[in-house]
Each structure stands twice: as C-alpha cells, then as structure tokens.
Image (cartoon, rainbow, N blue to C red):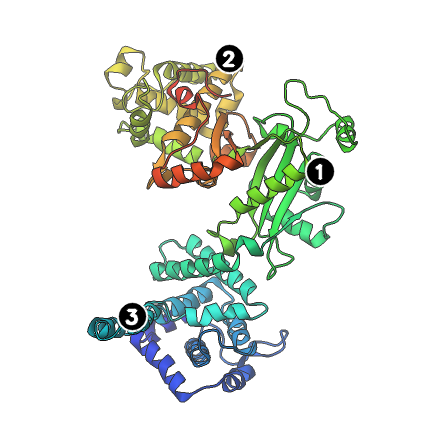
C-alpha cells in the first residue's frame, strides 16, 4: 500500500529540504529533468503506466524524487523565471498516473503536505539570521532578511504548485487537484495529517482566489438557442439547489421569457461554468418554489415578448418589476471557498437592470439548509429533559415569552399537542423537562411538547394535518425559522451557510415562509421552510460592514417582533 510505504519511508522534514537543496546544488536543468522523467511518465494514454505500479514504495520514491527535482528547477530559474511547459506537465502526468484511487490520492497529498510543507530547520535558520543581523545594517538588509524569513515560512510545495499556473492547462489542473483534496477531506474528516492537508487546501484556495479575480471573469447569459449542448449539460449538472431531473426542465427555465440564467467563465476554463445563477422575472416577491418554477402562461409570455406588452398581474407590481434569484450553484468543487457568487449576483443584477428598465426589486427565494438539523437537535435535547441551548440563546436575543428552556411559546405548545391529536396520535406524557408548568397545564411544558413536535416532523407527518391545524403548524415553523435566522450564530457569524453568504454580500432578510419547498430536498434540509433576502445595491456595502464587523443581521421591519410572537408569523 502506498500509505504504508509512505509512513515507513517518510524522512524527517529537514531531510526533504536537504534533498531539494542537493538537487539544486547538482544544478539539474530543465532539459535534464525532462529527459530524466519523460521516458518514465510520457507514454500513449492507451498503454499501461510504465515502471512500478501506483501504490508501491518505489512509486512513492519516484514521485518524491520528481517533486524534489522540479522544485530545484524552479529555484534555479528564480521567481518569475521561464520554465518549459514540459516541467509542470511531468508532475501533472505523474499525478494522473499515480493517484487513480482515493487511497493513492490520500498518500500523495500526504507526501506533499508533510514532506514538502513548511521546513522547520529552514524557518529556524532564517529566524536566527534575522535575530542576529537585523540591527547590523540599514533598511535594505532588514528587507532582505525579512524576505528570507517569509520565504522560509512558506510550504515547500508552493514552489512546485504555483508555477504550474504558467502551463496552459495548469490552472485547470490545480482546480481539479484541489477538488480531489476537498472531496478527500469531506469523506474522511478524521484523516491522519488532516491539519497539514487542510493547510494545503487553504494555500491553494488563496492562489486560486488571486487567479480567479473578478476582473478576469466573463459573464455569459445561458440560452437554449445559442449555448452549445455540452455547456447546457454542465449547467444542468451544476444545479445543486433545485436539481433538474431531465433536460426539459432546463429547457423550460431557459426558453421562458421571464427566466434568465447567468454563469461566470474564466479564460483557463472557457467551457466550464464556475458558478451559475438562476433568475425569475416576476411581478411580486415569491413565497414558494411553485410560484417560481410554474410554467409561464403562453398569453403572458407573448405579451412580455412584445414591445410595450403588459401581462395581468393582479395583486402584484408592474410586470417584470422583481428579479428573484432562486438558485446559485458552484460548478467547480475545487473553487470551494473562493467567493465568486457575490460578484455574479452583482454583475447579473447590473445586466438585468440595463435590460429591464422597469426592474425595481432584487430579491431571493433561498433555502435554509441547516434549519431542519438545528430544529431536530434542539427538540431532541429539550425532549430528553435537558436544557435546550438553542432556546436559551434565542431567549437572550429575543426576550420572548417562551417557556424557560423551550423554543415554543405556551400557545404554540397547546397547538402542537392538538395537531398531534388531530392525526389520531396520543400526545407523549409530560417528561422531567416539562417541569411544574407542564404538570399544571396538561403537559404543555417543554419536554412533552418537544417530543410531540418531533413526532409531527418525523416522516413529515405534519403535511397530512387538516386545515386549521396545518395553519397553526405553518405559523410555528415560520416563527422558528425566524428564530433560527435572527439568533443562532457560530463564532459571531450566521449559523446557516446560505444566510451567511447573503448577509456577507450585504443583503437584508425580508421574510420567512413555511410550505415554500415541499420537494424531498426542501423537506429534508429545512422542513419546507424558505426565506427571502433583498439586495439594495447602494446599501450592500454598509450592511456588509455591519455584519462582518458586528455580526448584525439586517432584517426588514417587524421580523424581530414576529420572531417574538408579537405579530402574525410569516406565511
């Protein structure tokens, strides 16, 4: 096994640095490196990999030697030096040949991250030189010593990976490489050398963020008629929020005159969408996905396509006055953590405002992917008789009249137990967590009520409730959704990842809606609850600063009162 060979053969970190330095002293040239490794790695694709099989100790030694030689070549050329394309191509070929399984990739990433990471002896030497000589000369000497110390503190693998960007296929390769690494870390969270591997992923993220600067990105509208079929397939595959089951769903999104789909592209990946944004042009702010995805009536579509045409819009604003962003999905896993979505929303909004002068509002209909997991965990804690940490946080933030240690308010507790009875199920008996209040009020306390709500959520039984009870549960879920979004945080930032994304962009929370997405995915991630955010582009900068500096959640007037139960909950 390559992993075992790696563990057995791994030298001390300074030995790797010494090997690279020795290669540099030998004066290996680009031509020598290419000649040395081409015969081993460059063979027709149909042929079996030459040399030892991937996963053997010998293949590990070969890759170690290749990395050392390649670093030596880049060092000899100096920063910004020209290295033949064949040098980075050798490493890319080696990765493809020697990392065909997850286990092989894990071992190769560990080789890079551990043996070719930060070299402690080099850092010690540079730090000692800084301490000994920084007062000996003027600013020029200090700058040279500081530069040497900063360079020593950088992982050695950057001297191999960053120059790959000079190769025509290098940036695309690094995106795929980081995608493989992130997938490995997600599949094996307790992985040995996890810290070193996460450091490798972070260094690659920083480099990719510079290379994928928004100034280099191209905004393209995706259309059914003009976009090549292969690209349409990639757009469909990238959709992760509201997955499309067949191509006709994509066709409907692209052909309707009140729909727009935009994507970002980069010169290094000209046919690969980096991030895709789906938009609906509407006359009102939608509360459900059914409103967004409903086919446009032919008459209305014809009217919108005609200059000056006006469609019926009873109960809403002027036709085409609202742009609703209802899905934004990354197309390249290797760019995870590189913030492209914010810029795509801004650029798409600018394009829409230029195309549609009557556009007055920019909103979203967004999922709350952490809501169900948060709610179920809090209710289980409460049902078990323990103090509900989420309820205590909410009570401190809201000052709401809910029962101590419970997410639910007294009237909601009664409605929950009545709803369970309406399905012909007996309400659970009061538990120790109900306390005196539960015993005095027919078990309306936290523990028994939490157990009742859990039973309603199990297998989404609440969807079968008759109308009066269904309305009560919808109001409860919508209010709890507000509690989740307004009060629940992690390290000062929003607990919900989608909310964090929009607040970081400077958006404002507008509303929360129950029964908004009753698809299997919508029920699984948020019990069908969704929310609207609003984008007021001139105000986004101020809201962005307030959120990043103070954790402030920009929310429409009345939402805090609704979360406290002092007004009718959002639908």
The residue singled out by tag 2 in the image is 468
- Which picture quadrant has residue 206? bottom left
Residue at image position (58%, 67%) is 169
- Which picture quadrant has residue 288? top right
| Label 2: element kind | helix
In this view, the residue farthest toward the bottom is 26
Q: Nearer the viewer, residue 498 or 9?
A: 498
| Dot 3 or dot 2, earlier in sequence | 3
Residue at image position (35%, 18%) is 409
Residue 237 locus on image (x, y percent): 61, 49
| Dot 3 or dot 1, earlier in sequence | 3
The residue singled out by tag 3 in the image is 139
**Image-based side of 345 in relation to 487, left or right:** right
Residue at image position (43%, 15%) is 567
The residue singled out by tag 1 in the image is 252
In this view, the residue farthest toward the front is 138
Residue 367 locus on image (x, y percent): 51, 35
The reply to whether residue 239 is in sight is no
CA separation in Å, label 1 and label 2: 36 Å
Residue 136 locus on image (x, y percent): 22, 75
Q: Residues within 10 Å of mark 3 (few under 14, many from 20)?
A: few
| Label 1: element kind | helix
| Label 3: element kind | helix
Quarter of the picture holding the N terminus = bottom left
The reply to whether residue 406 is in sight is yes
**Image-based side of 248 in relation to 324, left or right:** right
């Amino acid at each position: 096994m390559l992993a075992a060979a790696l563990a057995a053969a791994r030298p001390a970190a300074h030995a790797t640095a010494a090997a690279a330095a020795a290669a540099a002293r030998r004066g290996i040239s680009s031509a020598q490196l290419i000649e040395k490794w081409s015969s081993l790695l460059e063979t027709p694709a149909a042929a079996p990999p030459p040399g030892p099989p991937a996963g053997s100790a010998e293949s590990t030694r070969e890759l170690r030697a290749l990395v050392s030689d390649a670093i030596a070549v880049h060092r000899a050329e100096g920063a910004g030096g020209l290295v033949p394309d064949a040098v980075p191509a050798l490493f890319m070929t080696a990765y493809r040949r020697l990392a065909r399984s997850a286990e092989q990739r894990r071992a190769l990433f560990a080789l890079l991250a551990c043996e070719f990471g930060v070299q402690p002896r080099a850092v010690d030497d540079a730090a000692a030189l800084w301490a000994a000589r920084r007062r000996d000369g003027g600013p020029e000497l200090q700058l040279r010593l500081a530069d040497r110390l900063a360079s020593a503190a950088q992982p050695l693998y950057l001297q191999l990976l960053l120059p790959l960007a000079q190769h025509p296929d290098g940036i695309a390769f690094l995106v795929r490489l980081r995608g493989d690494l992130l997938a490995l870390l997600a599949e094996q969270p307790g992985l040995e050398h996890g810290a070193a591997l996460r450091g490798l992923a972070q260094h690659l993220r920083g480099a990719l963020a510079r290379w994928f600067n928004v100034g280099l990105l191209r905004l393209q509208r995706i259309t059914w008629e003009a976009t090549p079929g292969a690209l349409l397939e990639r757009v469909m595959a990238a959709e992760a929020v509201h997955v499309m089951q067949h191509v006709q769903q994509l066709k409907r999104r692209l052909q309707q005159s009140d729909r727009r789909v935009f994507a970002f592209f980069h010169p290094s990946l000209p046919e690969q969408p980096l991030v895709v944004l789906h938009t609906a042009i509407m006359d009102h702010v939608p509360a459900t996905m059914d409103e967004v995805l409903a086919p446009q009536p032919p008459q209305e579509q014809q009217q919108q396509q005609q200059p000056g045409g006006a469609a019926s819009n009873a109960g809403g604003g002027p036709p085409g006055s609202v742009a609703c962003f209802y899905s934004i999905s990354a197309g390249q896993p290797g760019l995870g953590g590189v913030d492209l979505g914010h810029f795509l929303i801004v650029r798409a909004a600018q394009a829409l405002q230029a195309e549609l002068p009557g556009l007055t509002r920019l909103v979203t209909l967004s999922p709350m992917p952490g809501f169900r997991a948060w709610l179920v965990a809090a209710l289980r804690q409460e049902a078990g008789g323990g103090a509900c940490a989420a309820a205590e946080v909410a009570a401190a933030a809201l000052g709401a009249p809910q029962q101590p240690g419970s997410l639910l308010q007294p009237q909601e507790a009664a409605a929950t137990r009545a709803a369970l009875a309406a399905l012909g199920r007996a309400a659970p008996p009061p538990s120790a967590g109900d306390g005196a209040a539960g015993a005095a009020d027919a078990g309306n306390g936290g523990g028994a009520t939490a157990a009742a709500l859990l039973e309603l959520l199990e297998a989404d039984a609440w969807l079968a409730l008759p109308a009066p009870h269904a309305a009560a549960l919808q109001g409860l879920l919508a209010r709890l959704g507000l509690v989740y979004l307004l009060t629940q945080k992690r390290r000062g930032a929003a607990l919900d990842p989608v909310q964090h994304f929009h607040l970081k962009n400077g958006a404002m929370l507008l509303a929360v809606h129950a029964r908004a997405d009753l698809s299997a995915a919508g029920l699984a991630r948020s019990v069908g609850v969704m929310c609207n955010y609003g984008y007021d582009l001139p105000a986004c900068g101020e809201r962005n600063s307030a959120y990043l500096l103070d954790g402030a959640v920009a929310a429409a007037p009345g939402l805090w009162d609704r979360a406290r139960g002092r007004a009718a909950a959002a639908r």
